[in-house]
Amino acid sequence: MDSTSTLTQASVTLTDQAYAALRMDILNGKLKPGFKLRVEHLKGLYGTGASPIREALSRLTGDGLVHAEGRRGFRVGRVSRSELFDITEMRILLECHALRQSIDKGDDAWEAAIMAAFYRLSKLDSRLLLASPGEEWEVRHKEFHTALVSACDSDWLQSNRENLFDQSERYRRIALSMKNSDRPVPEEHKTIMTATLARDSETACALMTEHFRRTAEAVSRSALIEL
């Protein structure tokens, strides 16, 4: 392997690392909506060079998480109620399409993966009574929703579904603690799982739709979300 190839691989690795770190900090609200993303500041914050930071910001612009301002640089994408509901309705379309495909094509291993993901998530559901359920709950929550649609074999559908999931979760993390005694989130997950394993597409999609819209309605009431 020549030196040019080695340098190229190292650059890709640094870019991937910067992209992952920036993306996580945007999704969990550490980098606030509208925050000015100055390359010099980010270099020190993430311990890498200007080139990987710029490339990561360009990728995040493609994800819709960062807004490019021409020569003025970049900002974290702003949030609004209209965008929240737009994301939610698009997410419903893709998620239900992927869920129907998974119910149609899923095998025993798919069913087992759903039950395992639900069990792992349920072990941490008591954390919903806290101000924040924590990163481990967030990871298991995503794993559960991913397991439900994992038998869908469309790469494009899965990629776009995941992006919309992350976009909607960004809103929830910015605006809303899951601490809400009036909303039985674990029971919502259980009923979605039960209908899915029963191969009842209509009920599963109706429950998923209600689940997403209830979250969007709750998030939209936050003062942190602009009109």
Image: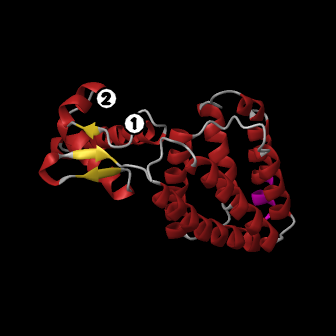
The furthest residue to the left: 71
In this image, 18 relative to 50: left or right?
Answer: right
Residue 153 visible = no
Numbered circles on residues, count: 2
Residue for point 22% across, 44% down: 54
**Where in the figure is residue 35, as x and y percent of width and height?**
31, 38
**Where in the figure is residue 149, as x and y percent of width and height?**
67, 62
Q: Is residue 191 above or below residue 41?
A: below
The N terminus, quarter of image: top left
Residue for point 75% across, 74% down: 104
Q: Amino acid at mark 1?
A: Ala
Q: Is residue 58 magenta?
A: no
Q: Is residue 111 magenta?
A: yes
Disc 2 to disc 1, C-alpha distance: 8 Å
Mainly helix, strand or loop, the magenta region?
helix
**Where in the figure is residue 89, as x and y percent of width and height?**
57, 66
Looking at the rendering, the stretch of residues picked out in magenta corresponds to 107-112
Q: Is residue 124 above or below residue 167?
A: above
In this image, 6 relative to 79: left or right?
Answer: left
Residue for point 65% across, 59% down: 213
Q: Tags 2 and 1 in contact by the CB under 8 Å rule?
A: yes
Q: Residue 128: which quarter of the image?
A: top right
Helix, strand or loop status at disc 1: helix
Residue 35 visible = yes
Residue for point 49% across, 52% down: 167
Q: Amino acid at mark 2?
A: Tyr
- Label 1: few (<14), some or many (≥20) within 10 Å? few
The tag on residue 46 is 2
**Where in the figure is residue 191, as x and y percent of width and height?**
83, 56
Residue beneath disc 1: 21
Question: Residue 138 or 174: which is nearer the viewer?
Answer: 174
